[in-house]
């Protein structure tokens, strides 16, 4: 049996068993041919395959995820991986005709074939996931071979899939995992949009090298002992122009909720001289998760990368819009916040 070993219970009771990520990575290095059939992929797992694939023949079959929608970043990375695997007669293939949700990994080593079945999608090949997954090695190699033969005949190479054949989504995974954020549905968003006023502020996103959305690249936060703690890449504090902060309708030194165009709600505030600092309350990362998460999900920015004018040009928009509403929640006013991709206008 193979378990996810990040969970404290598995570390306590299942210490004698190997972890799935460790087993996957070892077999991956030692195999000459690898077959993987999973329901879902993640951008980080695709990047891992791109970085670690050497001369192996790898066939990656994707099931349910294809039907539910891929982000622009998924598409970009899968195309890159597909071209790489084609060089060794491997492929990235999307399963057609059935909503495949299995998780099967087959490693062909020099003198044996090993097959694992379980609950781990491809995102579990690296450490650091909260969900508890269970996987087991199976001895039915013939059955495993027949499964991959069937999937081969009911699938299509990703490079042969046209863009109108799959649903393109811009899911901000980073926000959905943040505990200081509430998710709201489309009906609530529409209700908020119907309550907007004429007070609309277009706030420019600046690409200063060591501040604003690149504050992670600055000096850091000073500790009591005089050393500096590096800031998170997602930390953000937007400097708003005096033209906007001088408007009497602009929120000044108060906390308020924002409801975003993609369905999230969190608390923001303005502070500093002339209330020029627009940021999220508590961890500064929430606002950064929202903005940078959009850029990452659309494939124009990579984690750890400096935000530049070129990135914003590729996204097609360098302004967020903060719009007043007549709504309140928990005793705080509610504002509508949007940051549209160039194709969404």
Image (spheres, rainbow, N blue to C red):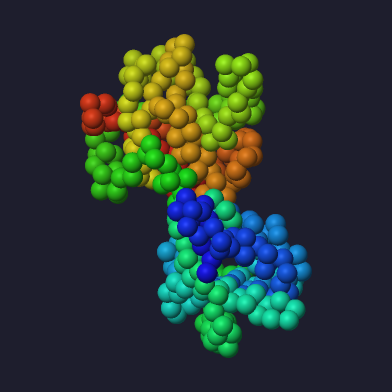
Q: Is residue 123 above or below residue 192?
A: below
Disc tally is 0
Which quadrant of the view contains residue 331? top left
Question: What's the residue at 38%, 37% (across, down)?
Answer: 180
Residue 304 location (% of width, % of height): 63, 40
Seen in the picture, residue 144 relative to 291 is either above or below; the reply is: below
Residue 38 appears in the picture as rendered: no
Q: Identify whether 334 is placed above or below 13.
A: above
Residue 51 vertical placement versus 150 (above, below): above
User: Which residue reaches farthest top?
Assistant: 273
| Percent of width and height locating residue 277 | 47, 20
Can residue 273 be seen by looking at this rendering? Answer: yes
Residue displayed at 60% across by 43% down: 303
Q: Residue at x 38, y 30 (%)?
A: 322
Quarter containing the C terminus: top left
Residue 165, image x and y in percent? 48, 69
Quadrant of res 143: bottom right
Q: Relative to the observer, which residue lies in front, 258 or 179? A: 179
Residue drawn at the location 55% of the way across and 85% of the way down: 140
What is the x, y in percent for residue 38? 51, 70
Nearer-the-camera pick, 122 or 234 = 122
């Amino acid at each position: 049996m193979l378990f996810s070993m990040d969970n404290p219970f598995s570390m306590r009771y299942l210490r004698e068993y190997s972890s799935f990520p460790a087993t996957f990575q070892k077999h991956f290095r030692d195999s000459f041919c690898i077959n993987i059939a999973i329901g879902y992929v993640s951008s980080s797992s695709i990047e891992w395959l791109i970085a670690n694939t050497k001369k192996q023949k790898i066939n990656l079959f994707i099931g349910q995820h294809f039907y539910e929608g891929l982000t622009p970043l998924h598409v970009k990375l899968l195309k890159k991986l597909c071209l790489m695997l084609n060089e060794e007669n491997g492929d990235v293939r999307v399963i057609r005709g059935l909503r495949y949700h299995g998780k099967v990994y087959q490693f062909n080593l020099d003198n044996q074939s090993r097959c694992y079945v379980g609950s781990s999608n491809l995102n579990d090949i690296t450490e650091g996931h909260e969900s508890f997954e269970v996987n087991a090695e199976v001895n039915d190699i013939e059955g495993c071979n027949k499964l991959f033969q069937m999937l081969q005949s009911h699938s299509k190479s990703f490079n042969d899939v046209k863009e109108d054949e799959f649903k393109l989504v811009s899911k901000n995974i980073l926000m959905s995992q943040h505990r200081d954020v509430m998710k709201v549905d489309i009906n609530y968003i529409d209700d908020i949009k119907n309550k907007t006023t004429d007070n609309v502020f277009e706030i420019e996103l600046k690409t200063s090298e060591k501040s604003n959305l690149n504050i992670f690249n600055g000096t850091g936060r000073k500790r009591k002992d005089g050393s500096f703690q590096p800031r998170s890449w997602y930390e953000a504090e937007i400097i708003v122009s005096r033209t906007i902060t001088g408007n009497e309708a602009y929120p000044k030194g108060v906390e308020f909720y924002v409801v975003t165009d993609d369905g999230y709600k969190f608390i923001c505030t303005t502070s500093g001289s002339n209330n020029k600092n627009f940021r999220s309350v508590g961890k500064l990362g929430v606002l950064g998760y929202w903005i940078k998460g959009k850029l990452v999900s659309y494939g124009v920015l990579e984690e750890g990368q400096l935000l530049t004018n070129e990135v914003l040009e590729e996204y097609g928009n360098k302004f967020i819009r903060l719009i007043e509403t007549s709504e309140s929640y928990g005793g705080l006013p509610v504002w509508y916040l949007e940051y549209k991709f160039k194709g969404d206008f």
